[in-house]
């Protein structure tokens, strides 16, 4: 293994604060760019009106299910690569990388075929009325995304494997390239060369008129956002696979590692299946919640879609620290350094609380202006009001959400994915969905009931998870006797 090509961070020796931040900061930035996909799509599609924004909300409930299950399986790659590296068995880290790639690719192909065929039924299932424009937009958008599912999963695999190895910078660079491509393509593929505000902003209306006269291109509408995403994801995925197989990130799987090995696949499923199940339950719960919100009307669904985008942004610090914690816990348990794994989780929890106190304080007085960025036009006032209420009601609870996610990250890094699954599922299915249903159906609170449900679910889940975590039953690593620790490579 060449040091020049290995960008991994040493998390098993020395201080913890700096390596934890060095690992987590690129993840936060990468996820911020990931949200850039969603925000760019929402912003430009928002120029088409509330039906178009609602279509993204319906579609996202389905796409999130697919992405969550596939992403859940890749967590096994993160856990196994990190623990084998911590134990000094680099050969097995490389082998797990190849096995994860092959197995999850097969899952992606199945998802793509089934999802494309069932898109109309799935969009109806989340509450879209087949007689509305929002339904047609959502079906078309969802089908295009399912065609590209392989690209999406390949990048997720590359990201997960690199993270387990301790390299979070390379995925960040690729995400930056991908998001830049998406942001450049979005306004043109969605709106074309007719009445595109981008030209007016840059004083290039003459150029717009010329391009329209030559091409007559008025854009693909909502479908244009999907096409832009497919192309930009494809670029990142292909470059990521090239870096992986040329050893540029430290991991060096061979073609032989791609041939599925039953014991390794079992290990991937043993660790990854609970995470995939957890994410599947979460995604299906969000789909059910979308259907509940649909009862309150199209404006409520549009506001819910905007809230999901804002929530993704608020989620970033917690997600970054949680995934950084996964790697630190995994490598230190592999190296038999249990107390260091404990310290990593405690340190991450303190940091995430500090971050969210600042974030909430900044967002609170700007609730309406923040929401108004994502929609304009006649009838948008209610959507803005509903979206602003999300920040005011649910915003403070994200302090608890941050701790909740860090604790789950510690559990996953140790391989305790079943416990993480149960604790994650409770947040949505035990608290958020039942409280939302009661608030909407019984008390007639509409979308405001959902905002209160989100707040209560995060507070209760953080408390329950902290109690479970402090029991300390998560501290056994999952590679166990499979490896004999050896000195780290130099």
Image (cartoon, rainbow, N blue to C red):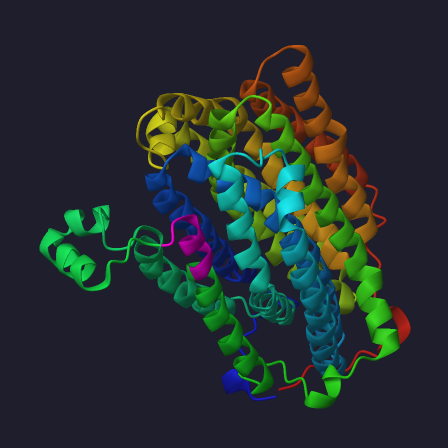
Relative to 480, 437 lies left or right: left
Question: Is any part of residue 15 visible from this angle?
Answer: no
Q: Residue at 12% of width from left, 52% of height from top?
A: 205
As drawn, 399 above or below 456: below
Q: Residue at 36% of width from left, 34% of height from top?
A: 375
The quadrant where residue 177 appears: bottom left
As drawn, 68 above or below 469: below
Check the picture and name the quadrant holding the N terminus: bottom right
The stretch drawn in magenta includes residue 224: yes
- Tell me the chief SS of the magenta region: helix
The quadrant where residue 9 appears: bottom right
Q: Residue 411 at what x, y percent from top left?
A: 75, 51
Q: Residue 386 at what x, y percent from top left?
A: 46, 23
Q: Residue at 84% of width from left, 68% of height from top?
A: 267
Choose between 201 and 180: the one closer to the eye: 201
Question: Is any part of residue 225 visible from this angle?
Answer: yes
Relative to 128, 41 lies left or right: left
The stretch drawn in magenta includes residue 383: no
Check the picture and name the quadrant holding the C terminus: bottom right
- Number of numbered discs: 0
Report the span colored magenta: 220-227
As drawn, 37 above or below 6: above
Q: Residue 173 at what x, y percent from top left?
A: 44, 68
Choose between 27 and 48: the one closer to the eye: 48
Choose between 17 and 24: the one closer to the eye: 24
Q: Residue 262 at what x, y percent from top left?
A: 87, 76
Q: Which residue sits furthest top?
A: 443
């Amino acid at each position: 293994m060449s040091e020049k090509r290995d960008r991994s961070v040493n998390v098993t020796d020395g201080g913890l604060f700096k390596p934890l931040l060095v690992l987590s900061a690129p993840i936060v930035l990468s996820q911020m760019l990931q949200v850039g996909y969603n925000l760019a799509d929402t912003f430009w599609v928002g120029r088409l009106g509330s039906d178009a924004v609602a279509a993204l909300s319906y579609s996202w409930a389905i796409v999130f299910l697919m992405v969550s299950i596939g992403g859940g399986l890749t967590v096994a790659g993160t856990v196994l690569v990190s623990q084998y590296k911590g134990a000094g068995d680099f050969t097995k880290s490389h082998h797990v990388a190849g096995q994860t790639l092959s197995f999850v690719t097969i899952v992606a192909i199945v998802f793509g075929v089934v999802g494309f065929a069932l898109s109309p039924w799935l969009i109806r299932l989340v509450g879209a009325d087949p007689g509305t424009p929002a339904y047609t937009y959502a079906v078309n958008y969802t089908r295009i995304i399912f065609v590209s599912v392989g690209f999406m999963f390949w990048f997720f695999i590359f990201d997960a494997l690199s993270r387990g190895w301790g390299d979070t910078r390379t995925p960040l660079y690729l995400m930056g390239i991908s998001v830049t491509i998406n942001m450049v393509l979005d306004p043109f593929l969605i709106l074309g060369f007719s009445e595109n505000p981008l030209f007016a902003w840059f004083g290039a209306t003459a150029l717009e008129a010329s391009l329209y006269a030559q091409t007559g291109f008025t854009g693909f509408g909502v479908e244009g956002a999907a096409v832009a995403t497919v192309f930009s994801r494809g670029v990142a995925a292909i470059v990521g696979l090239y870096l992986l197989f040329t050893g540029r990130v430290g991991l060096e799987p061979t073609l032989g590692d791609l041939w599925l090995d039953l014991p390794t696949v079992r290990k991937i499923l043993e660790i990854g299946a609970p995470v995939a199940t957890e994410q599947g339950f979460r995604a299906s719960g969000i789909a059910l919640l979308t259907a509940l919100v649909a009862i309150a009307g199209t404006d409520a669904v549009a506001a819910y879609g905007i809230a999901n985008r804002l929530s993704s942004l608020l989620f970033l610090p917690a997600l970054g620290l949680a995934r950084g914690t996964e790697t630190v816990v995994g490598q230190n348990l592999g190296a038999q350094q249990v107390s260091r794994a404990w310290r990593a989780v405690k340190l991450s929890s303190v940091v995430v609380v500090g971050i969210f106190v600042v974030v909430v304080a900044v967002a609170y007085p700007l609730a309406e202006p923040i929401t108004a960025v994502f929609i304009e036009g006649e009838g948008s006032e209610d959507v803005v009001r509903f979206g602003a209420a999300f920040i005011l009601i649910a915003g403070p609870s994200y302090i608890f959400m941050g701790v909740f996610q860090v604790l789950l990250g510690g559990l996953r890094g140790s391989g305790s994915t079943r416990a993480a699954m149960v604790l994650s599922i409770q947040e949505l299915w035990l608290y958020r969905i039942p409280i939302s249903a009661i608030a909407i159906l019984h008390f007639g609170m509409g979308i405001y009931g959902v905002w209160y449900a989100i707040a209560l679910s995060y507070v209760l889940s953080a408390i329950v998870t902290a109690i479970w975590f402090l029991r300390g039953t998560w501290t056994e690593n999952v590679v166990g006797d499979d490896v004999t620790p050896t000195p780290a490579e130099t």
